[in-house]
Amino acid sequence: MSEAPLMPHDQVAHLSLREAALVYARAGLAVFPCWPGSKKPATTHGYREATIDLERVGYWWRRNPQANIGVTTGTRVDVLDIDVHAGGTGFGALQRLLDAGLAREWAHAVRSPSGGLHLYYPADPDRPQRSWSRSSAHIDFRGQGGYVITVPSRITIAGDERVYEPVGQAFRGRPIPADRIRELLSPSPPARRPALSSVVASLEEHALRIGAWLGHSEGSDRNEALFWAACRLAELGASEHDTWAYLAEPADRIGLSHRETLATIRNAHRVAIPDLASTHHRHTATYARPQDRP
């Protein structure tokens, strides 16, 4: 008897979104609904409400039959997300990873609506790996605390509806060494400025912690939480571009639109960066760290 594939992509590719969601849940893959045509969660608490409970899944998709399917990562599956944007593509970086033997043993490949690629790997239950982003390489890793939109969901881009399409399957695959991949994709610090490496490491460490905190923020003060997080990263030396790379996904998980997120990040950088030393006390009341923030 042949081994079942990690993800039932081929099985669900031609099903309705409701039927597909139930197939994923029966396979033990926790799912949750996202708004039709988008990646934005349609539940109050986003991916944290993902479940394999068939009654709950059926209820969600009876209410909204066109809802896209979000699958949580980090427990059953991890995903390497190869992005394609107007500003660049991650396929060159992916080739570097393949040449280094670090990303070859994927279980499934799915073409994303933007023309990018999602490579699925089995997660190692004894070694959970946190999600991270490398905007300079146009590659994201979806592990613990993350999710992906999956087959047969559809995304609307510039008025055109495009699907997530399975393009390859290798059955079970093997866990991916996410930390080694992140190291390979990280820019090397200049040889003559060793102090910069500690600054970069400190920024990365703080950014990951702040992003994780933001992704678990709840309630009506989500935009305030994003503003505080963006101000902290600006203080630490992150550019607007890097702040977006670190905070866009957690902001999306708590229900903020890309437009809201971009506007808040820009505002935070205007507040936090100009003449920071002299304006620190003036802005402390706006973004001073409450006790429950990282």
Image (tube, rainbow, N blue to C red):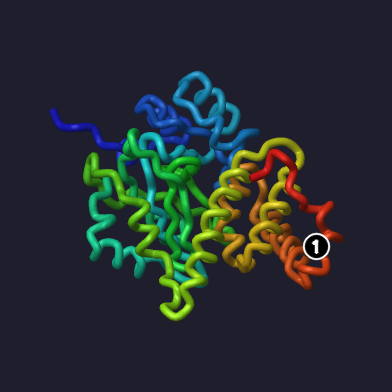
> Is residue 101 among what the camera can see?
yes
Mark 1 = which residue?
280
Closer to the camera in the image, 270 or 106: 270
Q: Position of residue 254 (x, y in %)?
A: 63, 42
Q: Residue furthest left?
A: 1
Mark 1 belongs to which amino acid? His
Q: Hey, which quadrant is residue 123 in on the image? A: top left
> Is residue 37 among what the camera can see?
no
Q: Position of residue 92 (x, y in %)?
A: 35, 70
Q: Secondary structure at mark 1?
A: helix
Residue 146 is left or right of residue 251, and the answer is: left
Residue 72 is left or right of residue 1, and the answer is: right
Closer to the camera in the image, 284 or 23: 284
Q: Residue at x 40, y 31 (%)?
A: 29
Q: Hey, which quadrant is residue 270 in on the image? A: bottom right
Closer to the camera in the image, 102 or 104: 102
Split into 4 quadrants, where in the image is the N terminus?
A: top left
Split into 4 quadrants, where in the image is the C terminus?
A: top right
Specify few, some or many for label 1: CA neighbours under 10 Å numbering under 14, 14-19, or 20 or more: some
Give the answer, above or below, for where 113 lies relative to 218.
below
Q: Residue furthest bottom?
A: 192
Q: Residue furthest right?
A: 282
Q: Position of residue 53 (x, y in %)?
A: 47, 21
Give the answer, above or below, for where 53 lies relative to 216.
above
Q: Residue at x 40, y 44 (%)?
A: 129
Q: Residue at x 43, y 60 (%)?
A: 139
Q: Hey, which quadrant is residue 260 in on the image? A: bottom right
Give the answer, above or below, for where 55 lies relative to 64.
above
